[in-house]
Each structure stands twice: as C-alpha cells, then as structure tokens.
Amino acid sequence: MKALGVILLFSFGALMVYASLGLPAHGDASAPHHRDVSVTGSPGAAAYYIRNAYRDAKTINMVTVTLGDYRGIDTLGETVVVFTAGMACYLILRRKKG
Amino acid sequence: MIQPSKSLIVAVVSRTMIPYLQVFALYVIFHGHYGPGGGFQGGAMLAASLILGRMALGGERAEAQFRSVWGSPLGAFGALVFATVGLVAVFFGGEYLNYSYLPLPLDDLALVRSYGILFIEIGVALALTGTLVAIFDDLVEGHEEYD
C-alpha cells in the first residue's frame, strides 16, 4: 500500500513536469494570455490592464491596481478566506475554562 | 501564558527589532501604490512583529502591547472595512467596489480610485494582522489546555 502511494506520487509528479513543458516561456508576448485579442476574438484583459492601469487609478503599481481595483471582489474573497481560517482556529482551538 | 525568553540576546534583539519591524510594515502597506508591497504583505509583517513580541518578551508584556482578545475583532473589522468601502460605492450610485463613486472631495475620479485602493489595502492589512495574531494566540491557549 505504501509502495502504491509512492508510485502514484511520482507518476503524478512526472505528469505535472510533463505538463509544465507545454507552458509558454516567461514574458512571451505571443502567448495566448498576453495577446491583445484572445483566441475567441474578445479583447484580452492583460493588455488592457497594462495600458490603462495608470489612467484609470493614478497608481504607479499596476499590480496593485489589478489586485485592488479591477479584481477587487477577488481580493475581498481572499481577505474573507484568511478571516475564515482565523475563525476556524478560534472555534476549534479556543475552549472556555471550567 | 508564554514565559519571557531566558536568553538576554533574544530579549534585547527582539525588543530592538519590533518597533522597526512595525514601522517597516506600515511602509510596506502604504508603499503598495508605488512598488512591491500592499495590505497582505504589510499585514503579515505587522502580525509577525506582534508574534515575535509574544514569543520573545513573554505573554505578559505582549498583552500590554496587543491584547489577545483584540485579535479576532480586529480581523473582523478589517474585512468589514473592505466590504463597507464596496457598500459605500453602491450607496452613492455605483457598482459594488466601484471606487469612482466614493464620496471624496476630489475632482479627479482616477485619484478617487487610488484612495479607494488605499482604503481596501488598509482593511486587508488590519484583517491579516488581527487574524494571524488570533491564530497564534488560539494555538498557545489550546496548548495550555493540555499541559
């Protein structure tokens, strides 16, 4: 049973490494997620963010604009996740004395 | 309650480091607009400085610095700040989290968005600080229960 687990672990690891070989190179401008127009013909989000982040929010760091403004609800979700983790620890670990 | 560290070096070094860590954490939070940084990173650093105080200086002095009952309420308050900024935008006629509609006395709507991002970053930082310190305190308290 233990040997099976190890074999499964390594085969999934090999699968992950094999899949990562198909990823586009870092900073490849022709990669699908960096194109102005996506494969389905809709405008790409990344190019819009890079061009308009400063115009829209007067903030130099476009990562912050993407995180806090364009993707604000996602960040709200992340904050709630952290808070939920804290609440789970509170409920599981903290016990009233006596 | 954690006992203070018996090592003089640990006590002196952490006592010296904690204020600088906290100032740097604030810098990281507010520098998020201009470079690497932001609410998550700064909040985690602020929590790390408080946890360092708890581990090195002992529970009694750490309680004076940041009481353990404040952790969870501060975390909830931070998440609430974030959600409230979104609701204020709805109240003034925009979409949820559309910072252009925040009622700030500025002509430039892009600048209003910038301040909106700052508000939510502060909310994120408070949520992170409170929650991480609360998790540490919960772990310590649970540990005492089984001593």
Image (cartoon, coloured by chain):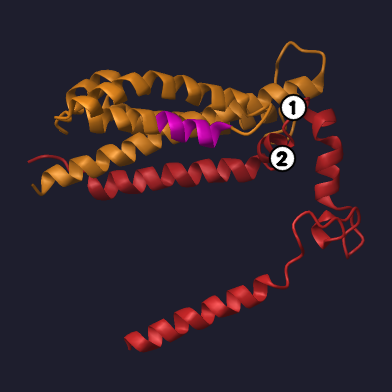
Do tags 1 and 2 sit on the same chain?
A: yes
Q: Which residues are magenta?
A: B38-47
Task: Compute the Cα span from label 1 to label 2.
Answer: 10 Å
User: Where does residue B54 sit, x and y in percent of width and height?
Assistant: 26, 30
Secondary structure, mark 2, is helix
Identity, as a three-letter code, of the amino acid under mark 2: Thr
Q: Is residue A2 left or right of residue A43?
A: left
Magenta run includes residue B45 = yes
User: Where does residue B43 sit, x and y in percent of width and height?
Assistant: 47, 32
- Quarter placement of the N terminus of chain B: top left
Q: Which chain is orange?
A: B
Chain at numbered mark 1: A
Q: Nearer the viewer, residue B139 or B61?
A: B61
Q: Is residue B7 left or right of residue B138?
A: left
- Residue that badge 1 annotates: A59
Q: Is residue A28 left or right of residue B54?
A: right
Q: Is residue B6 visible?
A: yes
Prevailing SS of the magenta stretch: helix
Residue A41 lies, with reference to residue A87, above or below; the image says: below
Identify the residue at horizontal 23%, vertical 26% (top origin).
Answer: B9
Residue B26 lies, with reference to residue A67, above or below; the image says: above
Q: Nearer the viewer, residue B47 or B13?
A: B13
Identify the residue at horizontal 34%, vertical 28% (top origin).
Answer: B50
Identify the residue at horizontal 30%, vertical 40% (top origin).
Answer: B136
Q: Which chain is red?
A: A
Q: Nearer the viewer, residue B114 or B45?
A: B45
Q: Quadrant of residue B53?
A: top left
User: Where does residue B35 sit, x and y in percent of width and height?
Assistant: 67, 30
Secondary structure, mark 1, is loop
User: Where does residue A70 sit, x and y in percent of width and height?
Assistant: 73, 40
Identify the residue at horizontal 81%, vertical 42% (top origin).
Answer: A49
- Residue that badge 2 annotates: A66
